[in-house]
Amino acid sequence: MFFTKRIGGEKYVRENVLELWSRSISRVAPASKGCGLVIFQHEGNLGVGEYPAINALTGKESVIVTAELPGINPDKLNIAVQNDTLAISGSRDIEALKEGEVYHRQERSHGQSSRTIKLPFNANADKIDASYKKGVLSITLHRSEVDKPKKIVIKSE
């Protein structure tokens, strides 16, 4: 109560929270018939927040990027690399319901998703390895020869 009075009252807080919420959510999908659940989808992401969740481990010669993508067919994944930028995109189809079935609860997201991250160096596009195992995409990107530090010999007279 003290907090709401200090910054402009309960109505002010309620209006601003709703405005911020509506800005962050780009689309609201209608609830399935009889389900009563509304699914929120961020623009360009599945679910709420950054998707897919990514870890990037950097070494001197390479970077290993892992992304959590459970339930996605590897054939529906795309990986693109240009200089120091990695782009991962894919899609998860909605599960088809049998006749007479309705969702009691639907929390698993579906649709298109993409994520772009900046790498710590330019990657060699000809030397990239990718694998998908147990819902985790693993990408190893090797440092471009042009981007590797070069030792400069100093001539003295």
Image (cartoon, rainbow, N blue to C red):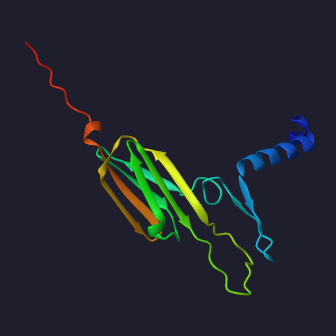
Q: Does the rendering let one see residue 154?
A: yes
Question: How far across and how far down the image is residue 48, in percent?
Answer: 65, 56
On the picture, is 90 further left or further right than 64? right
Residue at 72% x, 52% y is 25
On the picture, is 71 further left or further right than 103? left
On the picture, is 66 further left or further right than 145? right
Quadrant assignment for the C terminus: top left
Question: How far across and how far down the image is residue 31, in percent?
Answer: 77, 69
Question: How far across and how far down the image is residue 60, in percent?
Answer: 30, 43
Quick one: 59 or 102, which is closer to the camera? 102
Residue 93 appears in which quarter of the rendering? bottom right
On the picture, is 82 further left or further right than 148? right
Q: Is residue 113 above or below residue 153?
A: below
Quick one: 21 or 27, which is closer to the camera? 27
Residue at 25% x, 41% y is 145
Q: Does the rendering let one see residue 148?
A: no
